[in-house]
Image (cartoon, rainbow, N blue to C red):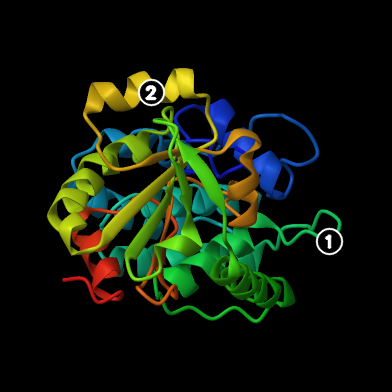
Amino acid sequence: MKSSTRIVPLLAAAALLATALLWGVPHLAAGAQQPAWSDAEKPIFEQLHKLRSLPDDVRAQTTRQLALQIRALPAGPNKLYLAFGLSGLSTEGDFGHDTLQEVAITLADALRESPPVAQGRQVPAPYVELASLVRYEHVDVSLDDPEFAAAMSRLQADDERRQRADFTLTDIEGRPWTLSALRGKVVLVNFWATWCPPCRKEMPDLEALYNQFRDRGFVILAISEEDAAKVKPFIAQRSITYPILLDPGGTVNRLFVVESIPKSFVYDRNGRLVAESIDMRSRKQFLAMLARAGLQ
């Protein structure tokens, strides 16, 4: 799940509450009071905190069941709160398109029933979440709401910005890397952090793919905002060999509009942005992304 980033991981009630406060879920923005759960809502809330501890196949089934249970709740801010939380956890891997479809329908229904209040000119995050599912996970939902339309437009503008993006950063060995200088190669730009559980989970798959394709012109640029003193021992312990770049101050994170991690972008050999992920990916999902750049 995703602090400046959707980085609040939903592992504790305080974290989930902080996410809702940050993203404008109704009734929570007024103060930091824990919602009063009904007898039907409380078990769902508790199961959200256990999702990451489940095996992937069980997690997929549980996610789908939770989506249906949330959808059956009476309309209200707690329903949106739960639908939003489930949505953020449902993209952490490959749990199947049908599961994501149910999650998206549930979030759309909750938004339709209890539209969140916009904070100034910012589109409320639940709309952005739903738009991300539609644009990047290819679910099929409809929502006749100007805030949802604005969220879809924002994501398109973000992608156009990423297509034009260029940067030079130094890796943990002191070598500089410039994105535009890698034309002719397939480049996967990955944003991550040592403290991020989904980031850590996908790293072995990234390492395996790097070793599989590096001789065919494949480069991974993994970017962290953290200090080298924290990143270097973490990488050494895990024997990661692909380039790890440091982004002190988060300049490149902002350039790519990174509001959640992990997040990955794939550029083909002509420098075109051809695929991206909004969360953790499995090896199978990464392979599908690379195939869009002609790497199979």
Asked which secondary structure carries label 1, the reply is: loop
Question: Which residue is labeled 1 in the image?
Answer: 121
Q: Which mark is residue 232?
A: 2
Mark 2 vs mark 1: in front: 2
- Is residue 72 at least partly visible in the picture? no
Asked which secondary structure carries label 2, the reply is: helix
Q: Work out whether 138 lies above or below 9.
A: below
Q: Work out whether 15 lies above or below 86.
A: above
**Front-lying residue, 91 or 267:** 267
- Judge from the rendering whether residue 83 lies leftward or rightward of residue 237; answer left or right: right
- Is residue 235 at least partly visible in the picture? yes
Percent position (x, y) of residue 251? Answer: 65, 45
CB contact under 8 Å: marks 2 and 1? no
Q: Within 10 angstroms of label 2, few (less than 14), some, or many (20 or more) residues?
A: some
Percent position (x, y) of residue 39? Answer: 48, 38
Quadrant of residue 230 in the image?
top left
Q: Work out whether 36 lies above or below 72.
A: above
Task: Check disc 1 and give the amino acid type.
Answer: Arg
Q: The C terminus lies in which quarter of the figure?
A: bottom left
Q: Work out whether 237 lies above or below 118.
A: above
Quadrant of residue 217 in the image?
bottom left
**Front-lying residue, 64 or 92:** 92
